Amino acid sequence: MYKVEIIEGYKQYTKNKEKISILENINVKFEKGKVYAVIGNSGEGKTTLLNIIGTLDTLTSGKLLIDGEEIIKLKDNEKANIRMKKIGFVFQEFYLNKNMTVEENIMQPLFLNEKYNKKERKERTDSLINLIGLTKRKKHFPKELSGGEQQRVAIARALANEPDIILADEPTGNLDKENEIKIFEMLKALSLSGKCVIIVSHSNKVKQYADVILKLEEGKLEVNENK
């Protein structure tokens, strides 16, 4: 079973009574253990596609399946539950709480998940802080971190509830080349650990880490294995 599948997906907006087509007849499957790079010019619908996969937006027609379950039929609270348990989001802007430490920012999503008790939240958070190499900075606030460090914290926060799907929208857009490579390497490592990683990026470097390249152009999606 595929982690994510879109079948005959269309997305349209209406502006001034005119229908504008963003995605047309999208058919694509995403597996665990791979990095998918979504590329294309600005305005082609890359973020829209990512938001649909993340259940933040909906298809005008067609099907979105996550673990074989058809999402369009679900209620908003059921979609929210899927986002909490199965999907981790990483954005260009880090969206860290400036009033929380590294430790607190990473732990925050765990309070929404009844799966964890207090001890388990602490253990899970410590494990993630160790994963991103910021053990000595766990009591620091975002303003005391570099951009690359803040993005590593954002990735750890996205991993808090152990999702199988990681959606990254321009995750290196605000970083220098050195930190860009570190973030791509971290996302690649997550795929090798069994995660399904989908990255939207304008950076050509993303192709070096991708197993599959998805090119969006004029609403059409071209899928190529990156060999």
Image (tube, helix red, strand yellow):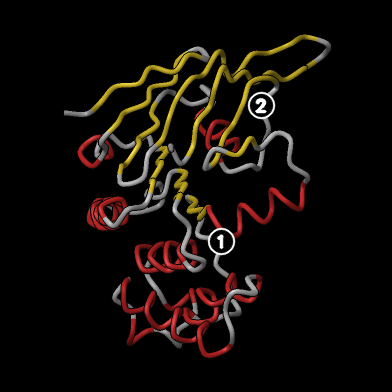
- The mark found on residue 144 in the picture is none
Task: Quadrant for residue 126, please give it.
Answer: bottom left
Relative to 118, say whether 211 is above or below: above
Residue type at numbered disc 1: Tyr
* Figure quadrant of the C terminus: top left
Identify the residue shown where x is 63% and y is 76%.
111
Q: Gap in Å between the C-alphas at discs 1 and 2?
A: 26 Å
Residue at image mark 1: 95
Identify the residue shown where x is 26% and y is 56%.
189
Of 4 and 95, nearer the camera is 4
Q: Position of residue 162 (x, y in %)?
A: 46, 64
Task: Quadrant for residue 149, please give it.
Answer: bottom left
Of 9 and 141, nearer the camera is 9
Mark 1 or 2, nearer chain start: 2
Q: Position of residue 169 (x, y in %)?
A: 47, 44
- Mark 2, other Cα within 10 Å: few <14 / some 14–19 / many ≥20: many
Task: Quadrant for residue 116, please give it.
Answer: bottom right
Q: Is residue 16 left or right of residue 28?
A: right
Residue at image mark 2: 59
Residue type at numbered disc 2: Leu
Residue lying at the far left in this picture: please name it. Answer: 227
Q: Position of residue 99 (x, y in %)?
A: 61, 79
Dot 1 falls on a residue whose secondary structure is: loop
- Mark 1, other Cα within 10 Å: few <14 / some 14–19 / many ≥20: few
Q: Position of residue 107 (x, y in %)?
A: 54, 77
Task: Count the numbered circles shown.
Answer: 2
Q: Marks 2 and 1: in contact by CB < 8 Å?
A: no
Identify the residue shown where x is 26% and y is 38%.
210
Relative to 165, say whether 159 is above or below: below
Identify the residue shown where x is 48% and y is 13%.
220
Dot 2 falls on a residue whose secondary structure is: loop
